[in-house]
Image (cartoon, rainbow, N blue to C red):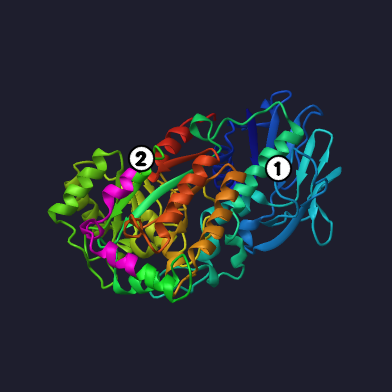
Amino acid sequence: MVYFKIDSPAFYKQAQYVFVTLFAMAGLRWRELKSESTIPAESVIFFYGTNPPNVQPQTRLIFIGDGHFQQNLNFAMTHIKWFEPDKKYLPLAHQEKTFTLFGGQVPAPGNKLFSQTDTDEPIITQKDKKIYCRADLIATAFYILNLETENLVKTRDRYGRYHKKYSNIPEIYDHPVIDQYVTLFRSLLSVLAPDIESKSIWPNGHSFAVALSHDVDRLNTWTFRKAKRAALNGPGPAGWKGKFSRGFGVLKSVLQPERWRGNFSYIVELEKKFGTQSTFFFAVQHRLPRDPQFRFLSDHVKNSIIYLLQNGASVGLHGSLMTAFDKNDLDKERQILQNITNTVILGTRQHYLRFDALKTWPLYESCKFTYDSTAGFASETGYRCGTGFPFYPFNKSSNSAYHFLEIPLVLMDSIFLLEHKLYVKPENAWQIIKKHLEMTRQYNSCLAINWHNNNICPGDVTGNTQIYEKILQWTADHNGWICSLENLAKYWRKKTDEKYE
């Protein structure tokens, strides 16, 4: 059990939200202290405020300085290093990047645990049973989780989307900053209170999670542009023999009827080999030119949805472009899909990842969705919310958490495949993906991926199916929990219902 106390009246609700969110990610039992007179002996207290509290010598304290960040939103990138990098109780990498805000002239007595790389200035110190952190991790975590960094930027693309390149510090999205903070909390606890253990975060002893999903934008596997791309850029020899071989493979695939019908049975059987299922997001209306435009209400689509549900997969809404900013359209499309499934549609992801936190999150709350997985980048990999963990975003109107989960989207197949995005060969794509998998494992976190149904098929000459299989195999080989987005959402909601206030 850990306790937390907040001495920051102007930022109290936000700080409380951050502690509860990060403690859930760390697997820690917690209780909030309303008064310092109720501090239990030999307890561990996280204290957030301008000045450290006066506590008994035996009280174990982790003090985090309030930098009054909310009054002057100005991010600073800081490189930090461990003062004793060989210590086993500090599991993060030596001299790893992190992004912090400083709490001003906060006392930092004692021995250095962490210092700034370039100046060697102490960031976190320890004296007896007290740890002092000069970096305002709480406010920084709040603003990164809730996308305040991008709300300060007015630039958007023609679909109203935010991209990494619009930020003045785009590197902030290359690392799961929030997950680093969670691991830092665990590390500080291991220094100060090795008797306190965090609960297992993931079921059945798994050390991390990979959540699977597929956006159903089209049923046909092949288009002319995709066939050309496969022949020229697919795996294998680069010469004319390789191109001819891949072109012949495309021709054989095109002639198979299932390649025009969604590949649903193939995906189900592939995932069954790993004992798992996934979530399929179906579009149901075509309103704008870039919306999906297959026959949404055909018997084949309806039967495919029934087949998926019968085989343990889940179905969510892939809202058309208009629904990102219109509640009536979002409600209408959800109802169309519910009429097909005869079940409540719990989850959603916007087509083209068209999303604005200030406009779209309130719609999900109003429509009473259970989870969303839109908060990612359409053209790059990365941690838009600073984390791979599911979390409840903060509702500024009510000054409390929303009731739906955001499951940040970190990886999407089209980022690697399309000419106007990264457009890399499969072997290079795998190296990028493996890096994200390794970070997820390192921080005991979660990785949500979106692999479109039309990019998974037998005899694939693009390399996309093989990469998807490698993701599943790598996760299974490294003790990861492979699950659908919907099962992840259900698990996390049940887990975070355990409150210890």
Q: Which picture quadrant has residue 121?
A: bottom right
Picture residue at 31% right of the left edge, 43% below the top: 314
In the image: residue 113, left or right of residue 24: right
Residue 271 image position (x, y, % from top left): 37, 44
Residue 111 image position (x, y, % from top left): 86, 43
Helix, strand or loop status at disc 1? loop
Picture residue at 47% right of the left edge, 70% below the top: 423
Residue range in magenta is: 248-269
Residue 13 image position (x, y, % from top left): 55, 45
**Mark 1 surroundings within 10 Å by alpha-carbon count, few (fewer than 14), some (14 through 19), many (20 or more):** some
How far apart are labels 2 and 1 at the CA level? 34 Å
In the image: residue 490, left or right of residue 85: left
Residue 401: in sight, yes or no?
no
Q: Main secondary structure of the magenta part?
A: helix
Instruction: Verify CB contact (< 8 Å) between mark 2 and mark 1.
Output: no
Instruction: State the residue position of label 1.
Output: 91
Q: Is residue 154 above or below residue 452?
A: below
Q: Quadrant of the C terminus?
A: top right
Residue 252 falls inside the magenta stretch: yes
Instruction: State the residue position of label 2.
Output: 272
Q: Quadrant of the N terminus?
A: top right
Q: Is residue 103 above or below residue 344?
A: below
Residue 156 image position (x, y, % from top left): 45, 73
Q: Report the amino acid beneath label 1.
A: Pro
Depth check, mark 2 against mark 1: the one in front is 2
Say which mark, if any, is on residue 263: none
In the image: residue 344, left or right of residue 249: left
478 or 247: nearer the eye? 247
**Mark 2 surroundings within 10 Å by alpha-carbon count, few (fewer than 14), some (14 through 19), many (20 or more):** some
Residue 430: in sight, yes or no?
yes
